[in-house]
Structure formats: C-alpha cells, structure tokens
Amino acid sequence: MKRFRVLIGLLIVIVFAGFVVAGLEKGDESLTKLMDGNKRFVSGNLAQKDLGDAKRKELAKGQKPFAIVLTCSDSRVAPELLFDQGLGDVFVVRVAGNVVDPIALGSIEYAAEHLNSPLLVILGHSKCGAVAATLEAKGKPEGNIGAIVSKIMPAAMAAKKKGGSHDEILETAIKENVKNVYKDVMKSKIINHLVHEGKLKVVAGEYSLATGEVETIELPKAVSTKKAH
C-alpha cells in the first residue's frame, strides 16, 4: 500500500512537471516569434499581414494572443509594429513609463488567466520621456502625472545614486524602472501563481528608438508566491 502511494505521488509529480515544461515551451516559442519579428522590423523585411475581411470576422469570434506586452504610451513604441505582428497576435497594455497600477495589472491578469497568453514582455525604451521627466522633477507635478512620477521615482533615485553622465543616469533609470515594474507585476497572486505553475513566462527588454532593436534586460529572481499580496 505504501509503495502504491509512493508510485501515485511520483506519477503526480511527473504529470505536473510535464505541464510546467509544456507551459515554458509555449512561452519560449512566443518569445522567439516576437524576437524574430523584431529582426524583420530592423531589417525592413516585414512579413505580409492578413488584414482582410475574413481575418476580421475570424477575430470577431474570439482572440488568442500569443503574447502580452506591457510598454510605454510613447507614440514611437508600437509593439505590433516593432515586433512585426498582425491583428489578434499581441495583447498590449500601454501607459506612460510602462508602469502598472491595479487597472493595468488587471488587464495583464485577464490576458494571462482568461486568454491563456503564455508570455508577458515588460518593455522599456531608450530616451523614455516619463523617466527623464522624473529625473528632472522638482516639487509636486501638476495633475495626475504625479502618480506616474511617484511610480518611477525609486528607479530615478537609484540611478542618481549610481551616478554617471546624464545619458548614463537616464539609461540606468530606464532599466531600474523595468525591474521595479516586474516586482510590482509579481505582487499579483494570479500572475505569481501562473509563473510558478509554468503557465506564464515573464521577460523584460528595452527598445532602442535609434536602431529599432529590442534587447533583453536581466530580471531579479521571481518573488515567492507566499510573499505576494
């Protein structure tokens, strides 16, 4: 009987591991699709897009985006273009400074949990105006812009502390902000659980306005589900 229970336990572990591996593979495949698309964008050799009536009618029945992209509202940073994707391919959440609040986080949770998107990309970009404005902020910003500034401020302070030239400080702040956003995203119980279960892969990158390339940013270790709130 004891041996039987052990075998059952091993079987459960193996099955669970299989689901995790399958989930991670989907995330890896989605990331490859995005990065291949970015290479096409940089080279100018763009893929032909299906924007016809039949495609629109098909998408009207439902969506299955293979990736979620959280990025800045900057007009020069359009995920569908810089990753060379078509209608229905990417679920996009955009806000100045690519920060998250409950509404943005809820949008990400929806795509990950209900649309089963296996990949989330947190994408910052070079010369980010929101980050630059935060570095130069003096006093309390007018209107609701203050909410954005307060989110980015920890990254700005860390960059100033590290020091360097004006451009180096800005670049450091951009990367630190992306890492802080990742930490905020991982505070979501839903996202944390999906990552832990191997159903969602989270990566980060920075888009260069000058070259068009997306380069990855190394993220800190995932926050434990027990620490999420």
Image (cartoon, grey):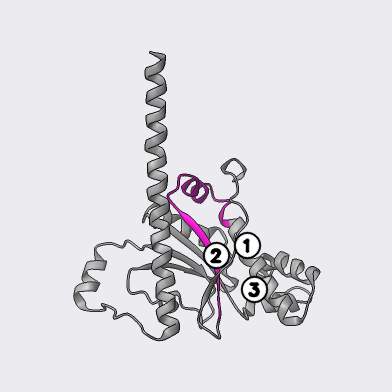
The kind of residue on which mark 2 rests is Ala
Whether 185 is drawn above or below 196: the answer is: below
Rendered-image quadrant of the C terminus: top right
Of marks 1 and 3, which one's residue comes earlier in the chain? 3
Question: Quick check: can you spot residue 142?
Answer: no
Is 59 in front, or is 143?
Answer: 59
Nearest to viewer (mark 2 / mark 3)? 2
Residue named by callout 1? 179
- Distance from disc 1 to disc 3, alpha carbons, whole Å, reads 21 Å
Q: Which residues are magenta?
A: 185-208
Q: Position of residue 178 (x, y in %)?
A: 61, 66
Which numbered tag is attached to residue 145? Answer: 3
Q: Position of residue 171 (x, y in %)?
A: 67, 75
Q: Are marks 1 and 3 in contact (CB under 8 Å)?
A: no
Q: Position of residue 49 (x, y in %)?
A: 29, 79
Q: Is residue 198 magenta?
A: yes
Is 22 in front, or is 199?
Answer: 22
In what element is the residue under mark 3? helix
In what element is the residue under mark 1? helix
Q: Are marks 2 and 1 in contact (CB under 8 Å)?
A: yes
Neighbours of disc 2 within 10 Å: few (<14), some (14-19), many (20+): many
- Distance from disc 2 to disc 3, alpha carbons, whole Å, reads 24 Å
Number of numbered discs overlaid on the protein picture: 3
